[in-house]
Image (cartoon, grey):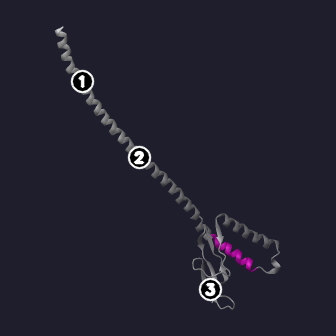
Amino acid sequence: MENEKKENLEKQPAHNASHNEAGGEIEELKKKLEECEKQKAEYVAGWQRARADFLNYKKDEVERFNEILKYANAEFILKVLPILDNFDLVEKNITEDLKNNEYVKGILQIKVQFLDFLKIQEVEPINCLGKKFDLNFHEVVAEVETDGKEAGTIIEEVQKGYLINGSLLRPAKVKVAK
C-alpha cells in the first residue's frame, strides 16, 4: 500500500506539471487567437476601404466618361455649323416669289431636320435680338448709330451663336446700337 501512495505522490507532480504546461499552451493559443482576430479586423477594414475607394473611382470614371461624351460632338458640330449658317443666309435672301416654290420648301425642310438633329445633341441657338450685349455669349462685329435703341442693345445678328449642354459652343456675332 505504501508503494501505491508513493506512486500516486510521484504521479501528482507530473500531472500538475502537465496541467501547468497545458495551461500555458492555452494562454499562448488565446494570445495567438486574439492577435489573429486583430489582424483579421485590420484586413477586413483595409479591404472595405479599398473596395469603397474602388467603387468611388469607378463612379468618378463613369462621370468623367459621360462628360467626355457630352462634349465629344462639339468639334464635329462646330465644323458643320457653317452649313446651317448657309441655310440661314439662303432663307434670309429668298425672294417672295420663291417662298412658295416646292423645291425651296424642300431645301428649307432640310434646315428644319438639321435643327432637330442639333436639338437631340443638346445644341440650342442663342436668342439675342433686342437683348443687351453680353460678352459671355456675343461677339460685336459692328456698332451702329440708331434712334430709339439703348446703347449696347443687339440690333442685328450677323452669325447665330450656339450653346451645347448649356455651355457656349460658338458666340453670336452681332451688331449693337451705339
Front-most of 87 and 60? 60
Nearer the viewer's eye, disc 3 or disc 1? Answer: 1
Q: Amino acid at mark 1?
A: Ser
* Left/right of residue 4 with respect to residue 33 in the rendered view: left
Q: Which residue is mark 2?
A: 45
Whole-percent x, y for residue 73 in the image: 60, 65
Q: Which residue is mark 1?
A: 18
Q: Report the magenta residues as a range.
A: 79-93
Q: Residue most toward the top?
A: 1
The secondary structure making up most of the magenta span is helix
Q: Is residue 2 magenta?
A: no
Name the image quarter holding residue 126.
bottom right
Q: Which residue is mark 3?
A: 152
Circle number at residue 135: none
Secondary structure at badge 3 equals loop
Nearer the viewer's eye, disc 2 or disc 3? Answer: 2
Whole-percent x, y for residue 67 in the image: 55, 62
Height in image: 30 above or below 56? above
Whichever of labels 3 and 1 marks the residue nearer the N terminus, that label is 1
> Disc 2, disc 3: CB below 8 Å?
no
Whole-percent x, y for residue 8 in the image: 20, 14
Whichever of labels 2 and 3 marks the residue nearer the N terminus, that label is 2
Q: Residue at x 70, y 66 (%)?
A: 116
Secondary structure at badge 1 equals helix
